[in-house]
Image (tube, coloured by chain):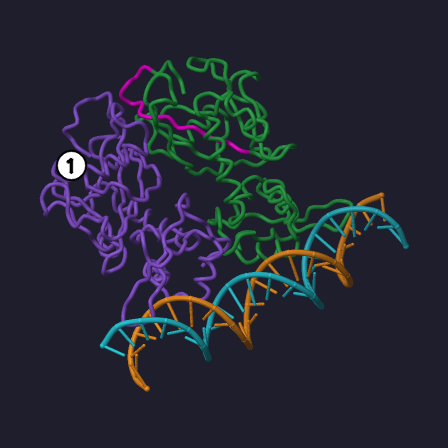
Chain colours: A green, B purple, C orange, D cyan
Amino acid sequence: MKTLDTAAAPAIATVDLILFALGEAGLEVLLIRRGAAPFLDAWALPGGWIHTDEDADLDAAAHRILREKTGVATPYIEQLQTVGNATRDPRGWSLSVAYVALIGPGQAPAVRGGNAADAAWRPVETVLAEAGDLAFDHGDLLGLALARVRRKVEYSTLPVHLLPERFTLSELQSVYERVLGRRLDKSAFRKRMAEVDFVEPVPGEMRRGSNRPAQIYRLKEARSTAFFDRVL
Amino acid sequence: MKTLDTAAAPAIATVDLILFALGEAGLEVLLIRRGAAPFLDAWALPGGWIHTDEDADLDAAAHRILREKTGVATPYIEQLQTVGNATRDPRGWSLSVAYVALIGPGQAPAVRGGNAADAAWRPVETVLAEAGDLAFDHGDLLGLALARVRRKVEYSTLPVHLLPERFTLSELQSVYERVLGRRLDKSAFRKRMAEVDFVEPVPGEMRRGSNRPAQIYRLKEARSTAFFDRVL
DNA sequence: AAAATAGTGTCTTTAAGACATTATCCC
DNA sequence: GGGATAATGTCTTAAAGACACTATTTT
């Protein structure tokens, strides 16, 4: 969201992004410090105006804005919800389409978008505890996004997108456990992953350590997210 | 969507509504014949511009537009998805927030909104088969809405909103079966309804016929939609 | 009594959860 | 061999699904 956007016609509405990655403390969200009024110097979600002259559609706008604000190019992304009311922006009636994006380690730029002070990864719990400090209604949007992700983890394969391209089943299980905040049974977990049939072993590739090597898996192509019959 | 809306400032984006009700042929959707270009005389979903001077927020806009276009005042309503691209409206880049609404028999006006020829309930299957005939990308929106409803019926109590306020458990089961297109086991169905605890018997009220009378139920207050642990 | 639907119970089959065992590497 | 984690198997327990039976009304 910029205040300097003066080309009235091509700017329709804003897109805000809730970008999650897995860090030391569990789920973390990328925040950007605002450099303009309103909410000057407050932390905010990365967002920007739709540009009708360069964005073919909403998803393209979300990708562009994410890339421009954070440098992230190819995340998993899905539309969350659209909020619009007279009070969320002091400048007047405001419409924003919120997107959730997930990236794995490595794709996550430590800090991007100008200088180091204006972007930061923050643990979601910490941010939510002080949700009111965020610009606009971004605290609400973060809450919505977190609820969506937590719920969807229960019945889908969403968490693969928080891992690098190649991973072991133990690593995948660990992601589920960290997002859900509870332990899962190993054999039940593997049975379910086999059922939904969305990952495949990479022949010959193993993760080695001071123990039995683990088979490395990757996402089956054309299978971005699968759904379970039942809840975990 | 009107072309005559010339007040540039307060009109931001459109809201389109997919209004479902249960008819003879199963799920039916309300369509309105367009009275202006583009797509003059084509069938379309009821929709209209957000008016920043009268709509407090998006949901309020959706309610107002539904009421104005169809006369329906108090439906179950939920936001579906927002679509925006350069091609859906020949007049230029267009943004629309789609809502799904469900109403029970009785709340459904046979025909409203001017004269009888400009609104009609149509079976979803029929309309989808000729989805390309609808104005804009409304065929796509209808497809999205139907997929959402069909999926959500599997794990939630959504179908109560297709019934009148008072109903029997057999009637409720019948709604599930008609939307899902398959039979359900009676005892399993009742067990599940008891589990989620979202309906309650109306003491003394029974539905009578030439058979054993059936207990009449109603939605428990403050419980619009509940979710199952598992899929039906 | 017959017909019809409501409502509940029983039994079989399946799946889930806890736990144990075996496997394979490094040191 | 010891330590560590991978991978799979077994057993117990709970739930789901199919089906049958009982209940209560009208005709």
Q: Main secondary structure of the magenta part?
A: strand
Amino acid of disc 1: Pro
Chain at tag 1: B
Which quadrant of the view contains residue B26? bottom left
> What's the magenta region?
A6-20
Q: Residue at x 29, y 44 (%)?
A: B75
Q: Is A197 left, or right, of B70 in this rendering?
A: right
Q: Secondary structure at mark 1?
A: loop
Q: Is residue A191 above or below residue A153?
A: below
Q: Residue at x 60, y 53 (%)?
A: A201
The percent position of residue B7, horizontal first and vertical second, equals: 19, 22
Q: In this orientation, which residue lies closer to the viewer: A150 or A172?
A: A150
Q: Is B8 left, or right, of A189 in this rendering?
A: left
Q: Is residue A177 above or below residue D13?
A: above
Q: In this orientation, which residue lies closer to the viewer: B198 or B8?
A: B198
Q: In this orientation, which residue lies closer to the viewer: B105 or A155?
A: B105
Q: Is residue A52 above or below residue D9?
A: above
The percent position of residue A36, horizontal first and vertical second, equals: 44, 13
Q: Counting other residues with Cα less than 10 Å from the Cα at mark 1, is it few (<14), some (14-19), or many (20 or more)?
A: some
The residue where tag 1 is placed is: B38
The percent position of residue B148, horizontal first and vertical second, equals: 37, 49
State the quadrant of the N terminus of chain B.
top left
| Residue A18 lies in the magenta stretch | yes
Q: Residue at x 47, y 35 (%)?
A: A144
Which quadrant of the view contains residue C5? bottom left
